[in-house]
Amino acid sequence: MSDTPCNVVVVRLASESDIARLTRTATLAFAHDPVMRWFFPDDEYFELQPGLVEFMCRRWQATGSLWCTEDGVAMAGWVPPGRPEVDVEAPAVEHPPWRLERFGAIRAALEANTPPEPHWYLNMLATHPDWQRQGLGAALMDVVFEQADAAGLPCYLETESVENVAYYRRHGFEVRTEWDLRAGDDPGPHMWGMLRPAR
């Protein structure tokens, strides 16, 4: 019998064996995300998004910054200060030119809006749709907030919905910049860059 109360969220670093479950969790969580649907506007989302998420999970895990709940229904992919480079093999997918242009547009926009000072970067926070609004995301953020605060470092993220802006504000983030994605004549979603100062 466990000594852990049922209302306590257990958060830990993810292992290699967690990646398949976390890939599914994040794929379902982002199924209606405006940016993901700009990249994958049709049924290709469920064909191609899992490979992209798995690649990202392996990058976060390589830097010891992929956190999850014990059951894998929620995860947070963080990038440590300095955004260290890691060598992880990308999925072998041949994307059409319009999608490559969109990938390039978001890459340029994120680089242009990244804070210059050292920070922890919350690259992805995802909770399986069946387990949302139970405080799992807050628990996953808190574990890194403690590290960031102890080091005197801010945390940064990007988001693409008004609802998420309100959610992250409740957790100490404030809007730092805003921009509209665009690839040539192809308009994309509006995005917000948000910063949480060290406490």
Image: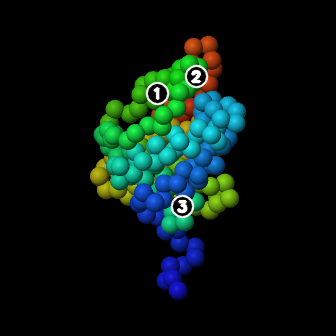
Residue 116 in the image, given as x and y percentages of width and height = 34, 32
User: Do the CB atoms of the residues marked 1 and 2 lie less than 8 Å apart?
Assistant: no
4 sits to left or right of 82: right
Binning the other alpha carbons within 10 Å of mark 3 as few (below 14), some (14 to 19) or many (20 upward) gives: many
In the structure shown, which secondary structural element does the residue marked by tag 2 occupy? loop
Residue 84 in the image, given as x and y percentages of width and height = 31, 40
According to the picture, the residue beneath numbered tag 1 turns out to be: 107
Label for residue 96?
2
79 above or below 13?
Answer: above
Q: Which of marks 1 and 2 is in front?
A: 2
According to the picture, the residue beneath numbered tag 3 turns out to be: 72
> What residue is drawn where x is 42% and y is 48%?
58
Label for residue 59?
none
Q: How far is mark 1 from mark 3, CA to CA?
A: 28 Å
Residue 14 in the image, given as x and y percentages of width and height = 43, 59
Binning the other alpha carbons within 10 Å of mark 2 as few (below 14), some (14 to 19) or many (20 upward) gives: few
In the structure shown, which secondary structural element does the residue marked by tag 3 occupy? loop
- Callout 3, which amino acid? Gly
10 above or below 40?
Answer: below
Asked if residue 135 shows in the view, the reply is yes
- Callout 1, which amino acid? Arg
Looking at marks 1 and 3 on the same chain, the residue that comes earlier in the sequence is marked by 3
- Callout 2, which amino acid? Pro
